[in-house]
C-alpha cells in the first residue's frame, strides 16, 4: 500500500494544543496585545517617506466630523438611552470624542484604498483631540 505524503501548509503556525490552559491563554492575550503597537509602528513607517499634504483636504473633513460632529450627535442621541450626567453617559460622550483609531490605517493599507488620507486623518485627529477631549472633560466636570 502506498502512503500519501503528509500535506503541509505553506505558513505553519506553532501549535499550543499540548500546552497547559494558562500558557494558551497568555499566548492568546499577548498575541492580540501586540496588534495596536504594531499598527502605530506601521503608521510611523508610512509617514517617514510620505507627506500628509496629499490627503490633507479629506483628512481635515474626516477629522472635523470625527472630533466635532460625532460628539455632538452623541450628545443629542444619548438622552434617549441613558442620563448624560451619569458615569455611563459621560463615558459614552468621551468615547465619541476620541480620535480616529489606527484600525482605519490598517484597513486602508490592507485593501490599498486611500492610505494617505487615512494616515493623515489618524495623525491630525490625534493631534487635535488633545484640545477637543480636554475641552469636553472640562465641560463635563470630570476630575
Image: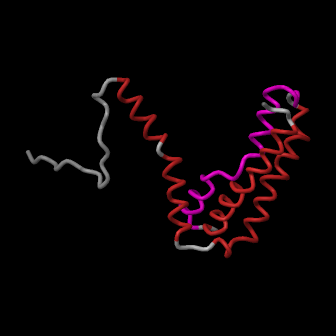
Identify the residue at horizontal 36%, vertical 23% (top origin). Answer: 21
Q: Eyeballing the image, is 24 above or below 136? A: above
Identify the residue at horizontal 91%, vertical 32% (top origin). Answer: 79
In which quadrant is the N terminus drawn? top left
Q: Is residue 106 left or right of residue 97?
A: left
Q: Eyeballing the image, is 67 above or below 27? A: below
Question: Which residue occupies the foreground of this view, 143 or 83?
Answer: 143
Magenta region: 83-112
Membership of 115 in magenta stretch: no
Q: Is residue 131 left or right of residue 123?
A: right
Q: Position of residue 92 (x, y in %)?
A: 78, 36
Q: Position of residue 102 (x, y in %)?
A: 60, 53
Q: Residue 124's quadrant in the figure? A: bottom right
In which quadrant is the C terminus drawn? top right
Identify the residue at horizontal 27%, vertical 28% (top origin). Answer: 18
Identify the residue at horizontal 62%, vertical 69% (top origin). Answer: 116
Amino acid at each position: 500500500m502506498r502512503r500519501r505524503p503528509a500535506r503541509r501548509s505553506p505558513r505553519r503556525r506553532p501549535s499550543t494544543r499540548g500546552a497547559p490552559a494558562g500558557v494558551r491563554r497568555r499566548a492568546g492575550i499577548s498575541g492580540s496585545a501586540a496588534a495596536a503597537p504594531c499598527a502605530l509602528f506601521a503608521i510611523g513607517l508610512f509617514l517617514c517617506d510620505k507627506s500628509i499634504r496629499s490627503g490633507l483636504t479629506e483628512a481635515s473633513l474626516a477629522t472635523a466630523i470625527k472630533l466635532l460632529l460625532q460628539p455632538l450627535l452623541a450628545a443629542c442621541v444619548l438622552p434617549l438611552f441613558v442620563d448624560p450626567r451619569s458615569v455611563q453617559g459621560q463615558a459614552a460622550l468621551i468615547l465619541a470624542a476620541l480620535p480616529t483609531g489606527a484600525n482605519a490605517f490598517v484597513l486602508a493599507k490592507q485593501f490599498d484604498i486611500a492610505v494617505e488620507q487615512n494616515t493623515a486623518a489618524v495623525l491630525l485627529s490625534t493631534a487635535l483631540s488633545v484640545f477637543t477631549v480636554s475641552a469636553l472633560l472640562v465641560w463635563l466636570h470630570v476630575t
